[in-house]
Image: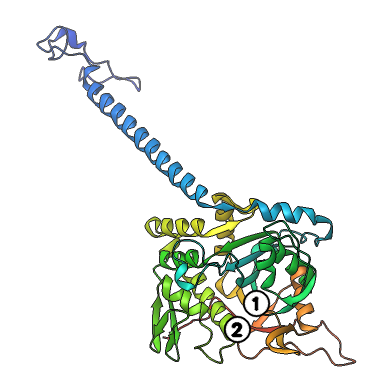
C-alpha cells in the first residue's frame, strides 16, 4: 500500500516538518525568511492603496463641499419682502392644501448692475417686464405657468416704498406694483387678484437671464420672419437659430418689430422660449454631464434673488428635481384671460368669468387644460344635460411642443 494514502476516509497524513528536510526559506535550510514574509509586501501595498483611496475620497469631498458652498453663497436672499409680507399676514390667502406650491417668477427690467446699462439708463426705478405665476401640483403631476400682463389694469394695495413712505391704494397697471413697492407689493397685488397664496418668489434681471441661456449653450428657435429691432439689440434673418444669451434676451423683449407690436405676442414668445429652455435643461446632456451642469447651477444661483424659504442650494435642487420629474407635456404655459381695457386699448383687463375660473382651479389644485390657437374656454353645459362639467380650456402650449418642426 502506498504509504501516503490512508486506509480510511480520515484526514490525509500531515506534511513533513520543513525544518527537518532543509527546505529553503526555513530555519534549518539555506533561506533567510519566514512564512509570514511572503504576503508582507502585498499587505504593505494594500495599506498604501487604501490610504490613497481615502485621500482621494477626502479630496473629492473637499472639492464637492467647496463647490456646494460657492453655489450656496451665490444666492441672494430677499428678507425685506419677507418682513413686509409678515405685516399683512392676516389678509393673505391660506396656504394651498396638500403639497401644491405657488411660486411667483419676476423678471426685473432694472438697468442697474453689470451688463444691463446697454438697455437704457438706470433712473433708480424698476418695473416687472415679466411676471409668471408658477403652480406646481401636489404629487408633482403637472406644472402650470400663468403669465400676468404687465399692462393689466388691477387694484393695487397701499405699498411701502423704498424711502419708507407709502403709496395710496389705486386702480392702475399691474407692473406699477413692482415700481412702487418691489416684490412684496407685487405679491400682495397677485394674491388680491387671484386669492392664491404665493409660497415663494424669485427675481431675475437681464444679466441673469442671459447667463442662464449661455450656460445651456443656447436655445433653438425658429423665425417665420426676420427681426430687426434696435431697442432689443437684435437683428436676425428668418429661419432656425440657436440663440445665445444676448440674442435670447432681445428675442423675449422685442415688441415693436414683431407681429402687431402687442405685449400679448411678446408673452407668447416668452412662453414658447421658456418651454424650449425647460426642455433643454431637462435633457440628459445637461443634467447628467457635470461639466455642463455646474455652469448651469452657477448661472442660476448667481441670477436669482429669492425669499428665505428658497435661498439654499438644497432648496433649489429639490425644486429642480421636482421640475425634472414632471413630463414636458405636463409643463404648461398660458396667459391669464384678458382683453383690451375698455377705456384704453393700450391696457388690458381680465375676461370674466374665465379668469376667476382659472384662479379657482389653481387654488383647488385641479388640472388646467391648454390648447394651441386662439384663446377659448370650454362652453358651459346646456340646460338639462348631466355629467361632470368639462374643465375650461385656455390658449397656451406645453414644453413638449417643438419650437422648430425640423
Q: Residue at x 76, y 67 (%)?
A: 191
Using the image, determine if residue 89 lies above or below residue 41. below
Using the image, determine if residue 293 lies above or below residue 282. above
Q: As drawn, is 250 to the left or to the right of 365?
A: left
Q: As drawn, is 201 to the left or to the right of 353?
A: left
Bin the neighbour count of mark 1 within 10 Å (Cα to Cα): few under 14, some 14-19, many 20 and up.
many
Alpha carbon of mark 2 to alpha carbon of mark 1: how far? Answer: 8 Å
Q: Is the C terminus in the top left, top right, bottom left or bottom right quadrant?
A: bottom left
Proximity of marks 2 and 1: CB atoms separated by less than 8 Å: yes
Q: Secondary structure at mark 2?
A: helix
Q: Which mark is residue 270?
A: none
Q: Nearer the viewer, residue 337 or 5?
A: 337
* The quarter of the displayed image where residue 160 is located: bottom right
* The quarter of the displayed image where residue 146 is located: bottom right
Q: Earlier in the sequence, mark 2 or mark 1?
A: 1
Bin the neighbour count of mark 2 within 10 Å (Cα to Cα): few under 14, some 14-19, many 20 and up.
many
Which residue is labeled 1 in the image?
A: 150
Residue 219 visible from this viewpoint: no
Q: Nearer the viewer, residue 32 or 139?
A: 139
Q: Nearer the viewer, residue 268 or 46?
A: 268
Q: As drawn, is 43 to the left or to the right of 179?
A: left
Coordinates of residue 303 in the picture (x, y in percent): 51, 60
Amino acid at each position: 500500500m502506498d504509504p501516503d494514502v490512508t486506509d480510511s476516509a480520515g484526514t490525509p497524513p500531515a506534511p513533513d516538518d520543513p525544518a527537518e528536510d532543509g527546505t529553503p526559506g526555513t530555519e534549518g535550510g539555506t533561506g533567510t525568511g519566514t512564512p509570514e514574509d511572503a504576503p508582507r509586501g502585498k499587505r504593505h501595498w494594500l495599506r498604501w492603496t487604501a490610504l490613497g483611496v481615502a485621500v482621494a475620497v477626502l479630496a473629492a469631498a473637499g472639492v464637492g463641499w467647496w463647490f456646494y458652498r460657492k453655489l450656496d453663497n451665490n444666492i441672494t436672499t430677499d428678507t425685506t419682502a419677507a418682513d413686509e409680507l409678515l405685516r399683512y399676514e392676516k389678509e393673505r390667502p391660506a396656504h394651498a392644501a396638500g403639497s401644491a406650491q405657488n411660486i411667483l417668477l419676476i423678471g426685473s427690467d432694472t438697468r442697474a448692475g453689470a451688463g444691463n446699462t446697454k438697455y437704457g439708463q438706470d433712473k433708480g426705478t424698476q418695473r416687472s417686464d415679466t411676471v409668471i405665476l408658477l403652480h406646481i401640483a401636489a404629487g408633482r403631476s403637472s406644472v402650470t405657468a400663468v403669465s400676468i400682463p404687465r399692462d393689466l389694469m388691477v387694484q393695487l394695495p397701499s405699498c411701502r416704498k423704498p424711502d419708507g413712505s407709502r403709496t395710496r391704494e389705486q386702480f392702475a397697471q399691474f407692473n406699477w406694483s413692482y415700481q412702487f413697492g418691489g416684490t412684496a407689493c407685487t405679491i400682495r397685488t397677485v394674491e388680491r387678484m387671484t386669492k392664491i397664496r404665493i409660497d415663494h418668489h424669485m427675481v431675475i434681471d437681464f444679466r441673469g437671464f442671459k447667463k442662464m441661456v449661455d450656460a445651456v449653450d443656447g436655445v433653438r428657435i425658429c423665425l417665420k420672419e426676420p427681426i430687426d429691432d434696435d431697442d432689443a439689440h437684435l437683428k436676425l434673418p428668418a429661419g432656425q437659430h440657436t440663440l445665445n444669451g444676448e440674442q435670447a434676451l432681445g428675442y423675449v423683449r422685442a415688441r415693436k418689430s414683431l407681429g402687431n407690436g402687442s405685449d400679448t405676442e411678446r408673452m407668447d414668445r416668452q412662453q414658447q422660449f421658456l418651454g424650449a429652455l425647460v426642455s433643454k435643461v431637462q435633457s440628459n446632456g445637461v443634467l447628467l454631464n457635470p461639466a455642463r451642469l455646474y455652469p448651469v447651477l452657477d448661472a442660476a444661483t448667481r441670477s436669482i434673488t429669492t425669499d428665505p424659504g428658497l435661498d439654499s442650494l438644497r432648496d433649489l435642487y429639490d425644486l429642480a428635481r421636482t421640475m425634472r420629474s414632471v413630463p414636458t407635456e405636463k409643463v404648461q404655459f398660458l396667459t391669464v384671460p384678458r382683453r383690451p381695457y375698455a377705456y384704453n386699448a393700450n391696457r388690458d383687463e381680465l375676461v370674466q368669468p374665465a379668469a376667476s375660473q382659472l384662479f379657482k382651479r389653481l387654488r383647488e389644485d385641479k388640472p388646467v387644460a391648454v390648447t394651441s390657437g386662439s384663446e377659448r374656454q370650454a362652453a358651459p353645459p346646456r340646460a338639462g344635460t348631466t355629467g361632470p362639467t368639462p374643465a375650461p380650456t385656455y390658449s397656451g402650449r406645453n414644453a413638449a411642443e417643438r419650437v422648430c418642426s425640423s
